[in-house]
């Protein structure tokens, strides 16, 4: 049986965090924030990790493979990446955290692209299917629930609802750019949501599962829908040029969205914060919109769209972002393992102020 290893980051003089031995931190892959923004999962060439971005503590997974990873309070699941012959890419293993015991080993016909988990279910995502399992009370093994056929899903997109009493699952629909939301308990299939005309790049359910936010591979527009009906709530504009949207997240009160993106030719990232509040005009508008509104002129969406009211720019690539605890604090994690804690502040340029920076450094000796 492998042992879970806890490690701490090491602070260097001058405020920059460095590994204790001076080695460069490994590249972080498959980064994903846990609901609430306190934990993030990621993999490196050294294995899979769960990091507490508040305490800087790291939990190293009990396997050397660096594939997809998911966890809840009771279990951790890891997929192989082919670097270890014992864990091929179509292979998933699961351990119970409280007893540090191996509880399940699953194999699939296709490579595993993603694993998502809440307290009641977990789903294993391949390019055209989602395999759903449950955690029955008192059972020693997860129970297979169903196999869902999806549209083409090369990014392994899938979302499970946060709360145990809400059993929604969201995944790409059969039509390009569409999202399907089903209820796992009742097996009720919702109507497909035609989110974008291009393939999806990112999607997220809100913490209370009432809203869905999506972006396409074009990366210029972000759309917010009512999860139950598919009704469009808001259309937001990230920018005019194509960009890769790395992550989307709602604030705990559903009044804001944070988006992390990067352009193909730039080794840098921009974090955008949008307001969803109905009673404010917090989001930015173009000059042409202000002129058109004054004269009551009809305007295309490219002019009338709402732009982010706050931004954070970094030279770090491959960033993901999430709200942490409330709608004012944001955490950003880059592919090099650098963590930025930021706060929304109307008194500074771009309205987003960096409060703390450090680097997550997995202990290579563990």
Image (tube, helix red, strand yellow):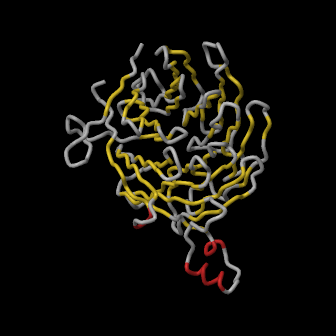
Asked if residue 146 can be seen in this view, the reply is: yes
User: 252 or 167: nearer the eye?
Assistant: 252
- Name the spot of residue 222 as percent of width and height, x first: 60, 59
Name the residue rendered at 55%, 50% in the picture. 248
Q: Is residue 238 above or below residue 65?
A: below
From the viewer's perspective, is 169 left or right of 191?
left
Asked if residue 264 can be seen in this view, the reply is: no
Name the residue rendered at 34%, 49% in the picture. 356
- Name the spot of residue 280 as percent of width and height, x first: 62, 66
How many numbered marks have been drawn onto this rendered protein structure?
Answer: 0
From the viewer's perspective, is 71 left or right of 59?
right
- Name the spot of residue 270 as percent of width and height, x first: 44, 59
Name the residue rendered at 44%, 29% in the picture. 82
User: 336 or 52: nearer the eye?
Assistant: 52
- Name the spot of residue 123 as percent of width and height, x first: 62, 31
From the viewer's perspective, is 337 left or right of 89?
left
Q: Is residue 168 above or below residue 235?
A: above
User: 41 or 16: nearer the eye?
Assistant: 16
Quadrant including the N terminus: top left
Name the residue rendered at 58%, 46% in the picture. 252
Quadrant including the C terminus: top left
């Amino acid at each position: 049986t492998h042992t879970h290893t806890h490690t701490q980051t090491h602070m260097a003089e001058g405020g920059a965090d460095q590994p204790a031995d001076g080695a460069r931190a490994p590249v972080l892959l498959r980064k994903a924030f846990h609901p609430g923004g306190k934990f993030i999962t990621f993999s490196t060439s050294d294995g899979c990790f769960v990091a507490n971005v508040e305490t800087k503590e790291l939990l190293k997974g009990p396997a050397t493979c660096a594939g997809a990873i998911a966890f809840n309070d009771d279990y951790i699941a890891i997929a192989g990446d082919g670097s270890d012959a014992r864990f091929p890419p179509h292979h998933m293993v699961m351990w119970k955290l409280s007893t540090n015991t191996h509880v399940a080993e699953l194999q699939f016909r296709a490579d595993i692209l993603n694993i998502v988990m809440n307290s009641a279910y977990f789903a294993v995502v391949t390019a055209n299917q989602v395999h759903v399992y449950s955690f029955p009370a008192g059972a020693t093994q997860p129970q297979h629930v169903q196999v869902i056929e999806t549209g083409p899903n090369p990014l392994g997109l899938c979302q499970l609802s946060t709360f145990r009493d809400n059993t929604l699952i969201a995944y790409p629909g059969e039509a390009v750019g569409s999202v399907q939301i089903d209820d796992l308990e009742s097996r009720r299939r919702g109507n497909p949501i035609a989110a974008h005309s291009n393939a999806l790049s990112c999607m997220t359910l809100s913490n209370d599962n009432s809203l869905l936010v999506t972006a396409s591979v074009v990366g210029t527009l972000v759309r917010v829908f009512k999860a139950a009906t598919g009704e469009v709530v808001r259309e937001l504009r990230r920018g005019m040029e194509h960009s890769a949207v790395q992550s989307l997240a709602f604030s705990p009160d559903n009044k804001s969205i944070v988006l992390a993106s990067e352009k193909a030719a730039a080794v840098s990232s921009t974090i955008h914060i949008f307001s969803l509040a109905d009673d404010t005009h917090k989001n930015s508008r173009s000059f042409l919109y202000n002129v058109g509104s004054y004269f009551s002129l009809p305007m295309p969406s490219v002019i009338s769209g709402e732009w982010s009211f706050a931004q954070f720019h970094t030279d770090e690539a491959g960033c993901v972002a999430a709200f942490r605890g409330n709608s004012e604090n944001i955490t950003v994690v880059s592919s090099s393992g650098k963590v930025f804690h930021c706060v929304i502040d109307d008194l500074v340029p771009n309205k987003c102020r960096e409060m703390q920076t450090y680097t997550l450094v997995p202990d290579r000796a563990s």
